[in-house]
Image (tube, coloured by chain):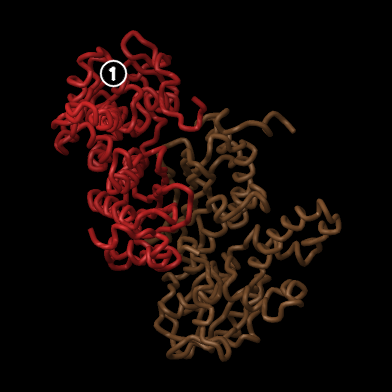
Chain colours: A brown, B red
Amino acid sequence: VTETTHQRVSDLGESGLIDRILERIGPGQVEVVAGGDDTAFVPLDASSVLFTTDALVEGVDFDFAYCMAPDVGWKAVAVNASDIAAMCGKPLWATVSLGLTPATPVATIDGIVEGMVEASARWDIGLVGGDITTASELSLSVAMIGSLVGDAPVLRRGARVGDALLVTGSLGGAAAGLRLLQHREAAIERAEDHPSGRAAGSGDVAHGLMKRQLRPEARVEEAAVLAAFGPSSMIDLSDGLAMDLRRLMGASATGCLVEPSALPLDPGLDPLFEYEPGGGLELAMVGGEDFELLFTLEQGAVAAATHAVEECGTACTRIGTVVEGECSVGDKPLSAWEGLGWDHLRSR
Amino acid sequence: VTETTHQRVSDLGESGLIDRILERIGPGQVEVVAGGDDTAFVPLDASSVLFTTDALVEGVDFDFAYCMAPDVGWKAVAVNASDIAAMCGKPLWATVSLGLTPATPVATIDGIVEGMVEASARWDIGLVGGDITTASELSLSVAMIGSLVGDAPVLRRGARVGDALLVTGSLGGAAAGLRLLQHREAAIERAEDHPSGRAAGSGDVAHGLMKRQLRPEARVEEAAVLAAFGPSSMIDLSDGLAMDLRRLMGASATGCLVEPSALPLDPGLDPLFEYEPGGGLELAMVGGEDFELLFTLEQGAVAAATHAVEECGTACTRIGTVVEGECSVGDKPLSAWEGLGWDHLRSR
């Protein structure tokens, strides 16, 4: 409602925008040179480091038709934190490269920064640098460094035949949330003719699912706790259980036997799919963006590790066993879901 | 001339493209997990780290009308290496976030990767991770980490009254090269009517200037050598001497007196500007992208530091003195060039 609401980034210019962003991020810790110099200088007492990058692009990875600017900022940090967690690492520092159109409202940038600051506070990550460039669409490319919690990173390769296969939290919620958000928009459009359409996508259950999509949690505490139990392999679920399970087992050159009834489907899926039996399983298998940890562990460590993760307030479920040969989910081969995952470059 | 020439990234899909890129980058060093896991794991024996990011966007930072794909890959690495060098740091590891349109030719990606690999080899940087997303234009966002050469980073703030002001290499060449490249295109278009127009932009001098624009050198060795002499402040020249001098002196809360006749203009500017006296100075002041180091040093260390940089095969020139108060270039205040630098967000 202030003048800011109508400002475009072209009104501020690059240095004005950078000053504004730095103000919102707040002062850095002592010893940290962050923002306003050529590169950030951060403490990091280690003999090795985890280093990752992941970008979000408007219209591909998010859409302002159904999300707010702070959601986008949060998610850009969360997806990188999740990648660090998936190595049994602790995220520490992040930079962001912003692609902006000159017409981008300043209020949008403020919102994105607000969400990045919130997510950074959530996992105690320092935002220490960035870059702004003009582009024809809005994008955020975050890079993040982290340290190991244990003595060695937990890789995708490393699962051994006989290990238990486990997953944190629940599955399918983020993809269901996306459907609701997209559907709600459609419902709101239809509501111009039929006011009762506004009811679509309301209620606590729907809200919980939409939150899984808009404000994903990175399993940082859970990864730190798991390090003590020495998982033999681990990955975060960004592209759906089917594709990420294939990656994990493929890297380990093993197969697996997943018990479909053991899969911890998000309880919000039940009311959503009462008209479509099996729809929840489909979302868990190919929906993506749950950002849960999928990992393998010696059988003997399962009970204690499960208990430790539950102490974080997060479920931890054994969903199967590592075997020789192929991957299967119940009596279906994993390949039944092949090609259903998200490949944003492939022509459709 | 192979089938590849006509392939689009949409023909390969994301995993096919990643495999292709990893193949071209080659195997990582021992102990490094690079590509194919959730995040890179790299050795880094230090109590602190330098961390930066910088992006290039098609149509803003480069244009295939006048540059080749390997030039783009080279430059994306070089500009980040230059930011690390400007802190008296040594670049070590890089990730790249690629924004691609589905119609991007695979040959273009191959070329970009080739240029990134060349630049990484040039400065001994490990390419250890990345991310690919769909976008409506081609972009490369590189993030880089590095280590300090000395005991502390050299910041922008730190110049002291009485210090000498120095610059490595030569000025204005990159901007002149850009003009030649853009002009050459125009000349080639005109050449359809006037074949003699093809001569524009030819010759060794022109080639040297265009190379400054297309294949910038990051002053990594020079920064390492300078660390021993304890520069009081330093910045790399990305946006022209006027803007970067204002940043350096502004951060240090000092002024400076620059002797215009001392400025090491690129010798290629002379023939280019014989018809436009002072044009070379203008390019040096506001042209940008020279990626030379601008730094301040105690008077007593100037001779030895200059000699040490020259041992790297790079010129090193004292261009002025740090003073109290304002910045001036000869009898003109630095503000005379204000607003002429590059601000890609500001409306024109």
Extreme residue toward the right, this view: A196
> What residue sits 65% from the left and 74% below the top?
A170
Judged left or right of residue B125, residue A83 is: right
Crowding at dot 1, Cα within 10 Å, few <14 / some 14-19 / many 20+, comes out as many
Task: Return the residue nearer the eye: A217 or A7.
Answer: A7
Q: Is residue A35 left or right of residue A121?
A: left
Q: Where is residue B48 in the image (x, y as percent from the top left)?
A: 40, 51
Residue underneath mark 1:
B281
What chain letter is assigned to the residue under label 1? B
Q: Up-down: is A33 above or below B323? A: below
Residue at image x 55%, y 33%? A17
- Dot 1 lies on which element? helix
Against B95, is B275 above or below? above
Please identify the quarter of the rendering in which residue A241 is found. bottom right
Above or below residue A258? Residue B9 is above
Asked if residue A130 lies left or right of residue B262, the reply is right
Q: Which residue lies furthest to the front in this view?
A: B193
Count the numbered circles shown.
Answer: 1
Image coordinates of residue B128 in percent, x first then y, are 35, 60
Q: Which residue is drawn at 36% across and 31% down?
A: B233
Q: Is residue B25 visible?
A: no
Residue B136 vertical placement versus A302 (above, below): above
Q: Where is residue B113 in the image (x, y as percent from the top left)?
A: 31, 55
- On-image quarter of the N terminus of chain A: top right
Horizontal and vertical percent for residue B310? 16, 33
Q: In this view, does A58 lie to the left or right of B54?
A: right
Residue A265 visible at all: yes
Q: Which amino acid does label 1 sit on?
A: Leu
Q: Residue furthest top?
A: B331
* Foreground residue among A96 and A223: A96
